[in-house]
Image: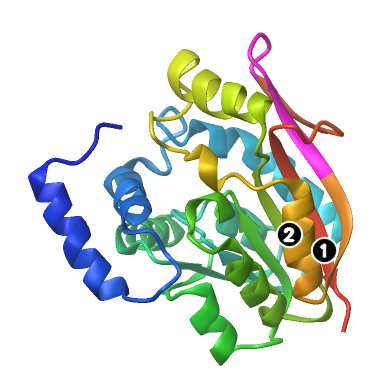
Amino acid sequence: MESPGNGGFSFVSSLSAIIGLMNADPLELQKFSELAHRWWDPTSEFRPLHEINPLRLEWINALAPLAGKRVVDVGCGGGILAESIAKKGATVTGIDLSKKALKVADLHSFESGVSVRYEMISAEDLASREAGQYDVVTCMEMLEHVPDPSAIVQACATLVKPGGHVFFSTINRNPKSYLFAIIGAEYVLRLLPRGTHDYAKFIKPAELSQFARNAALEVKVIKGMTYNPITKIYSLNQDTNVNYLIACIRSD
């Protein structure tokens, strides 16, 4: 995606003033807001999300059966994961700070008939209001887009009930992840718009595990997710060098 011009800079400045001390990057919010209308188009920039969603959904459901559970999806965007969790029989809340993405999510929920409660609120603010009220918390492909990922992890830990499950997915930080997630995905294969990711914001599994432990979460499973450019198939395995997922349980 091209960088914003002067009008975009003005928007970012205004958005910065609105956000204040909130744990969000105005440029990241603008970037995804501009693409929001294409969120549910499986041939758009969001094609990778559509393709990995069945994998991550079934992985989550295998570890924490979703039927009858109360779930919050943190950084839900246009609602791809949130709707699929609701289809599993869960009562789902989706939160995000992109107003445009939430409008798209809400409209798609109305059109599909899948009930999801969407709200424009930060994870930290929701945690203050609804601490310990969720059986499952998901935060997928979001931590690498915020200034302080440890605060998001803490908020997720606060939201979940004791004994409840918290799931994260993000991108490792090493030469291979730079080559695959940025050069390969954004410039060579063009799976994602250029500028989607900032290498400096990638998070090593050891770092995310430490964030989790600091938040009284016990890391139970770490899985890698890889993409085969020849078969164009994503798979879960033990290779955590690029994309990976972590499953945690609140220990207190």
Rendered image quadrant of residue 19: bottom left
- Image coordinates of residue 40 in percent, x first then y, are 43, 43
* Main secondary structure of the magenta stretch: strand
Can you say whether 149 is above or below 187 in the image?
below
Which residue is depicted at the point 67% across and 24% down?
Answer: 176
Query: Which of disc 1 and disc 2 is earlier in sequence?
Result: 2
* Residue position for label 2: 167
232 lies left or right of 183: right
The residue closer to the viewer here, 35 or 27, is 27
Image point 73% across, 59% down: which residue?
A: 167
**Disc number for residue 5:** none
In the image, which disc is placed on residue 248?
A: 1
**Element marked by disc 2:** strand
User: Which of the pair 199/132 is nearer the observer?
Assistant: 199
Crowding near the residue tagged with mark 2, few <14, some 14–19, many ≥20 C-alpha atoms within 10 Å: many
In the rendered image, residue 24, in percent from the top left (x then y), is placed at 42, 64
**How many numbered marks does the figure carry?**
2
Instruction: Give the residue drawn at x 38%, y 76%.
Output: 21
On the picture, is 115 further left or further right than 218? left
- Characterize the local packing of mark 1: few (<14), some (14-19) or many (20 or more) Cα atoms within 10 angstroms: many
Label 2 with label 1: CB-CB less than 8 Å: yes
Where are the magenta residues, as a range?
223-232
Quadrant, the N terminus: top left
73 w.r.t. 132: above or below:
above
Whether residue 81 appears in this view of the structure is yes
Residue 239 part of the magenta-drawn span? no
Q: Residue furthest top?
A: 230
> Residue flagged by tag 1: what amino acid is it?
Cys
* Residue closest to the eye, 239 or 57: 239
Q: Position of residue 76 (x, y in %)?
A: 51, 59
The amino acid beneath tag 2 is Phe
Front-lying residue, 87 or 222:
222
